Amino acid sequence: MSNNGVGIFLDRDGTINKDVNYLTSADQLSLIPRSAEAINKFNSMNIPVFVVTNQSAIAHELLTENQLHKIHDSLQEMLKKENAFITHFYYCPHFLTGLENNYSIDCNCRKPKSGMLEKAKLDYGIKFTSSFMVGDKLIDVQTGVNVGMKSFLVETGYGLKHKSEAAPFANYIVEDLFEASTIIEKLLS
């Protein structure tokens, strides 16, 4: 399914759905306009779409992994209603100074480290230099840059706040995920 090793890596909050600062319930989910349409475009191109999201709420005992899976199931259902889907959700539950000892570690998966991307590479045969990272924070852009991906900063979520610090690292700064999908489609054609 990996379309010559190409993969699309998306931050979740602020890129696909509206950021609510510690999303802990599916009731808080709300899609950013045109994000489902963008994901549908990638799906139509047979490019796997991965969510890579830091979820320190688990380490802070605000959310369980089971609750997170329910949120991702709900997000997938919302996207399916728009004829779109996420290939796989990867998440980092860790935070070095979290309250929950099992998750209070210095891991290799917390963005901007590349552990979640490395897992997708193994699981799906992804080639980083052929792939794309899209997110609304400097750490998202850095995550992509760290493995040789083209990186996009979206102006949704925290994007406008992170624009000046991310600009030197981002390959593209775009209005939203849909604009990123349009550029990626042209780059791959």
Image (tube, helix red, strand yellow):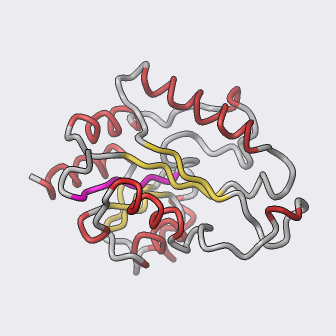
Q: Which residue is drawn at 30% across and 48% down?
A: 179
Task: Judge from the rendering whether residue 163 lies leftward or rightward of residue 177; answer left or right.
Answer: right
- In the rendered image, residue 136, in percent from the top left (x then y), is placed at 51, 58
- In the rendered image, residue 65, in percent from the top left (x then y), is placed at 73, 44
Q: Which residue is drawn at 28% across and 47% down?
A: 181
Q: Nearer the viewer, residue 55 or 171?
A: 55
Q: Which residue is drawn at 43% across and 56% down?
A: 154
Q: Against 117, is 36 above or below? A: above
Q: Nearer the viewer, residue 139 or 129?
A: 129
Q: In which quarter of the image is the N terminus?
A: top left
- In the rendered image, residue 37, in percent from the top left (x then y), is placed at 33, 32
Task: Judge from the rendering whether residue 56 lies leftward or rightward of residue 147; answer left or right.
Answer: right
Residue that lies at the very extreme toward the left in this rendered image: 189
Magenta stretch encompasses residue 7 = yes
Q: Against 69, is 62 above or below? A: below
- In the rendered image, residue 91, in percent from the top left (x then y), is placed at 60, 54
Magenta stretch encompasses residue 124 = no
* Residue range (magenta): 5-11
Q: Which of 141 and 101 is in front in this view?
A: 101
Q: Against 51, is 142 above or below? A: below
Picture quadrant of residue 85: top left
Q: Which residue is drawn at 18% across and 49% down?
A: 185
